[in-house]
Amino acid sequence: MKFLNDLLEKLYPPVKPLQPGLYSYRPEKDDDFPFSMHLRIETPEHAILILHAKTVLHLNQTAAEFLYDFIQHMSRDRTIKALSKRYAVAKATIASDYDDLFERLQVLMTTPDLDPVSFLDFERQVPYSGEIAAPYRLDLALTYRFSEGSEVESELQKRITQELSEEEWLRVVEKSWEIGVPHLIFTGGEPTLQPYLPKLLAAAETHGQVTGILTDGVKLTDRDYMNLLLNQGLDHIVLVLDPDQDACWEAVANLLPEDIHVTVHLTINQTDTDYYQNLLENLQNQQVSNISLSARTKDMQQTLDEVNEIALDLGFSITYDIPVPYSHYNPVELELEAEEVKEVGNAWLYIEPDGD
């Protein structure tokens, strides 16, 4: 019997579980799969795919193995051969499953309104709920200082009397990677006022983390500085638009031709929907396609809803779960659906300039 067991184990070795950890994929130029991926294996039975820092999907073990092999640069044929032998399943079946997975991911990323709950076999996690090993995102407020001429919340600057040093922020970035956080957003205040922002971006880039900034855009009117950030691996930008500031519009014009995802944020602070209709049409004429919206106060909720409908009618993609800076142009609370904010601490953490 022992001989038979040894023979069977040799012919059909037991499936080895994937090792827990965070595995990243960053596409090269002209890659057939041009989307970043972070595969976080929590347990042998539980893996999560964070696709392009936008969508969180729970994976079955086979899908996780496909993606793990892909991230490790294993060829399609080699993966199919290995899994066919491991699970004693026909190569044609494994090949079909492999191709189907990547086709679905491609469609998911190229169809903005596609709901993966109804399209994918594996279940999409309700945002910001459930037990996870580490947050999906860290929002790092590098400072509560603002660009010259901006209105500020003085009580916040009085409360935060110290800021972490460059070395301390670099340790935060390093620690975030060690615990498996795939996505960092640098905010404030105005993060571009910190001279070491490019170094923080470069540090995250060495890990393969996705990075973004939330900015008023003033420093991005300097093309040399803008290119410096882009060259350090910056992946996306949320630009807080002050419609009355020419610098904001100049920054938008500078950014849109670049190979980076740009979202323009508008804070609803008046009830004149015609004003926002004209503003959105202007953004559309500038080729802006992604916006986020929030209301200055709860009294603006109805106007926010109306502007949201105008934006959808114009064809904008709308993002809601952006980091919230403490500034004149952003509220402390985003207008999120109830299920999105139920357990927000699970999805992201916010670190203030002093490290709290």
Image: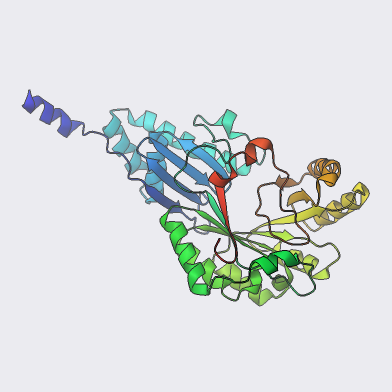
On the picture, is 19 further left or further right than 307? left
- Residue 216 in sight from this viewpoint: no
- Residue 286 in sight from this viewpoint: yes
**Residue lying farthest top?**
1
On the picture, is 9 further left or further right than 64? left
Task: Give whichever of 145, 239 is nearer the camera.
Answer: 145
Q: Report the residue at 66% width, 41% height from top.
A: 112
On the picture, is 144 further left or further right than 168? right
On the picture, is 322 further left or further right than 316? left
Residue 88 on image: x %, y %: 28, 28
Task: Give whichever of 355, 267 is nearer the camera.
Answer: 355
Residue 284 on image: x %, y %: 81, 53
**Quadrant of res 303:** top right
Q: Report the residue at 50% width, 29% height from top.
A: 121
What count of labels does the image hold? 0
Q: Report the residue at 74% width, 51% height from top.
A: 291
Residue 297 on image: x %, y %: 81, 49
**Quadrant of res 84:** top left
Q: Report the residue at 12% width, 27% height from top.
A: 5
User: The C terminus appears in which quarter of the rendering?
Assistant: bottom right
Residue 3 on image: x %, y %: 6, 27
What colouring does the structure picture have? rainbow
User: The N terminus appears in which quarter of the rendering?
Assistant: top left
